[in-house]
Amino acid sequence: MVAALSKQMSTLQTSTKKTLTSTVAVTTPHTPSAPAPQRGGGKGDRNTNTGRGGRGQPYNAVPRVVVGGGVSGLPPPNSRSDPRERTYFNGRKCAHPDGATGNPSNVNWTPELWEYGIFVDFDEWQRLGVYDKLTTLLAQARPSDDTCSNHRVGRAKSDSGTLSNKNGCAYCLFRPRAPAGTAEADKWMYGTGQGAHSPYRCQCFIRFLAEGGGPDTPDKHRPYLQGILLKRFDKQ
């Protein structure tokens, strides 16, 4: 009898276990996928990550994480250590003209004014460039090739739209080279065959404009070249 009772208890436990197992549903937790970044109909602000106008949705800017001097996932910025880059940004250097010669403010030159107080107005250059009578004059300052018989037109830029290649400064690239024995102080009048810098910052080119040309330039033509220089109002 004890054996029969024990068999009944075992059968009851097995039946109860199967019942519980069949009534408990095993579910796998579901995590909904994040919606794709969207942009509102209005403009967003990268810095505050907020939007305005439109549907009021924020601008989902990509975070700019700086790692080791650069943006994450990108190489570090150019250190500007290449000599060609320094040449491009600095240009050739030379002394300023005597007195107030060519200074658009008609005041005596100072080192600071010569370095920071003027710039080349290529819009004026373009305006003068349509006059055939000025072709020879302009070709001496900004020649289109080493014959110096014609001049470049328009704003200063290379074929690629920049000034960072060998054709940046036509004055230095195409002007005649200085003869042997030329004094260092007079070398600004000559080219070097190296034009890989911006004419906006080439003091030799600017000096030629400020002087109104070279020794052989007719006096009546000098004001045209000098008029291409403009002053920076924050410096004079």
Image (cartoon, rainbow, N blue to C red):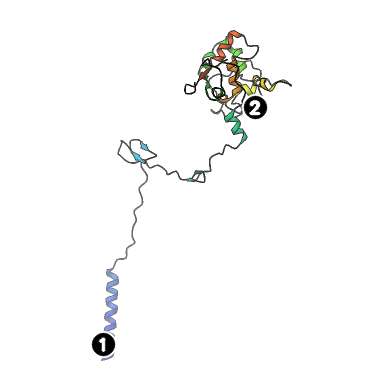
Mark 2 or 1: in front is 2
Q: Left of 62 or right of it: where is 214?
A: right
Residue 129 visible somewhere in the drawing: no
Is 231 or 54 nearer to us in this picture?
231
Tell me what residue is drawn at x 62 percent, y 16 percent.
140
What is the three-letter code of the residue carrying label 2? Gln
Tell me what residue is drawn at x 28 percent, y 81 percent.
11
- On the image, which quarter does residue 214 sit in? top right
The local secondary structure at tag 1 comes to helix
Q: Left of 168 or right of it: where is 71?
A: left
Q: Position of residue 27 (x, y in %)?
A: 32, 63
**Residue 5, numbered label:** 1
Q: Residues within 10 Å of mark 2 (few under 14, many from 20)?
A: some
Q: Position of residue 223 (x, y in %)?
A: 56, 11
Tell me what residue is drawn at x 26 percent, y 84 percent.
8
- On the image, which quarter does residue 19 sit in? bottom left
Is 218 or 44 nearer to us in this picture?
218
The local secondary structure at tag 2 comes to loop
**Residue 32, numbered label:** none
* Tag 2 residue: 194
Residue 5 visible somewhere in the drawing: yes
What is the three-letter code of the residue carrying label 1? Leu
Quick check: 143 above or below 72?
above
